[in-house]
Amino acid sequence: MLCVKFEPSESYGGLDVCSLTLASGEVAVMVQENGKRKKPNILVTGTPGTGKTTMCTALAEATQLRHINVGELVKEKNLHDGWDDELDCHVLNEDLVCDELEDVMEEGGNIVDYHGCDFFPERWFDCVVVLQTDNTVLYDRLSRRGYKDSKLSNNIECEIFQVLLEEAKESYSEEKLIAMKSDNIEDISRNVATLTDWVRNWSLPSQS
């Protein structure tokens, strides 16, 4: 599902509503809850290797929003409970991560980049993007990263069964959720342009 056109936001019953016309012709509706944020928060999630950090870096540059790479933050601030040898990664301490991010998320203007999404408070985000990549492309990307066979297989299976998309659907309202293809640099550039337009159309809720 790729967004290609944005309509200006309108206010209905205390909610700002922005419609998105998709490539399929389907119209999606993004709902912005009333609050004090002057800039939106975006969550970008997806299986490792789908291009999250590449896209978030470009989107942050285009919009002047703050890019928060949760994986790097966890290492920098020691927001973990040690190392998992089997999964070859840190054991994330979700409570510590949420405590660390609470204030900055309330301020708004953030792009959060992480492969998990079900432990963040839904109220933090105005838009949740799930990146999706062809399995063959993903396999090549993860192989180049030097992933062990078991870790590589686990991530490919996650993408095949759309684990992150299902996790996002269970954790966030449909109005906030967008799935975007991310197979190549052209896809990434198009996604950045689409989301940049959305950020520009995002406005403060009407004050009653």
Image (tube, helix red, strand yellow):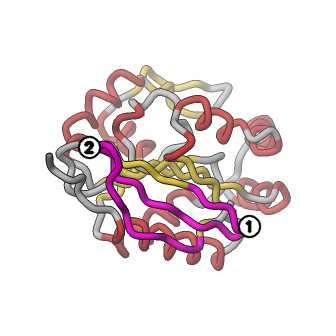
At label 1, the amino acid type is Ser
User: Hey, which residue is sitting farthest front in the picture?
Assistant: 13
User: Is 121 placed left or right of 45 in the picture?
Assistant: left
Queried whether the magenta region covers residue 189, the answer comes back as no
Label 1 sits on a secondary structure element that is loop
| Circle 2: element type | loop
* Left or right of 52 in this view: 72: left
Is 203 positioned to the left or the right of 163 in the image? left
Mark 2 is on which residue type? Asn
Number of marks drawn = 2
Give how far across and how far down residue 165 sits, in percent: 66, 41
Q: Which residues are magenta?
A: 4-28
Q: Is residue 89 above or below residue 7?
A: above
Q: Is residue 90 above or below residue 207?
A: above
Cα separation between marks 1 and 2: 30 Å
Q: Which residue is mark 2?
A: 34
Disc number placed over residue 24 in the picture, else none: 1
Residue 69, x across and y down, in percent: 41, 50
